[in-house]
């Protein structure tokens, strides 16, 4: 019986983490893409549009970093990008 309760608790924790992850993803990515489209429609395809797409994730990372054992300055890594192979 205790093993079943532990398994149910783990399953509930995983579900909660998934919901939080999806909510965070939607809450960061969607505004970022909307902001980029707005700036791109106003000013065209220039570096400002690229920087605007990174502004929202940078702000979210800087705000939430201490809760995940990161430093606020780690948000600057959004400016580096994934790189080329």
Image: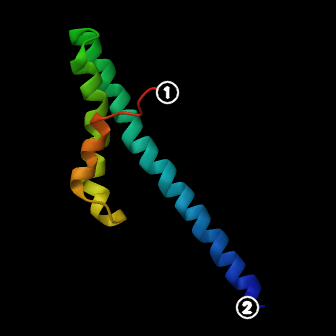
The quadrant in which residue 53 appears is top left
Q: Residue at x 25, y 54 (%)?
A: 63
Expressed as whole percent of the image width and height from the top left, the position of residue 5 reads 70, 84
> Relative to 8, is 37 above or below?
above
Residue at (49% x, 53% y) in the render: 21
Question: Disc 2 and disc 1: Cα gap in Å?
Answer: 50 Å
Q: Farthest residue toward the front?
A: 85
For residue 2, side relative to residue 23 (left or right)? right
In the picture as drawn, the residue positioned furthest to the top comes out as: 44
User: Mark 2 vs mark 1: which is more N-terminal?
Assistant: 2
Which residue is situated farthest in the bottom direction here? Answer: 2
Residue matched to label 1 = 85
Callout count: 2
Question: Which residue is more in the foreground, 2 or 51?
Answer: 51
What quarter of the picture does the N terminus occupy? bottom right
Q: Nearer the viewer, residue 64 or 8?
A: 64
Secondary structure of residue under mark 1: loop
Say if 20 sits above or below 82 in the image: below
Label 1 neighbour load within 10 Å: few <14, some 14-19, many 20+: few
Count residues near mark 2 (Cα–Cα under 10 Å), then give few for <14, some for 14-19, many for 20+.
few
**Mark 2: which secondary structure?**
helix
Point out residue 72 in the picture as x, y percentages from the top left corner.
22, 55
For image coordinates 31% across by 60% down, the residue present is 70
Q: Are marks 2 and 1 in contact (CB under 8 Å)?
A: no
Instruction: Look at mark 2 in the image and give the residue it sits on.
Output: 2
Q: How is the image coloured?
A: rainbow
- Give residue 65's mark: none
Q: Position of residue 74 (x, y in %)?
A: 27, 51
Q: Residue at x 30, y 58 (%)?
A: 65
Disc 2 versus disc 1: nearer the observer: 1
Quadrant of residue 39 within the rendered picture: top left
């Amino acid at each position: 019986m205790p093993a079943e309760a532990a398994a149910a608790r783990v399953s509930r924790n995983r579900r909660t983490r998934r919901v939080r992850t999806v909510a965070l993803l939607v809450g960061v990515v969607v505004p970022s893409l909307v902001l980029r489209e707005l700036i791109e429609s106003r000013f065209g395809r220039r570096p400002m549009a690229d920087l605007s797409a990174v502004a929202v994730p940078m702000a979210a990372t800087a705000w939430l970093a201490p809760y995940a054992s990161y430093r606020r300055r780690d948000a600057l890594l959004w400016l580096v990008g994934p790189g080329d192979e």
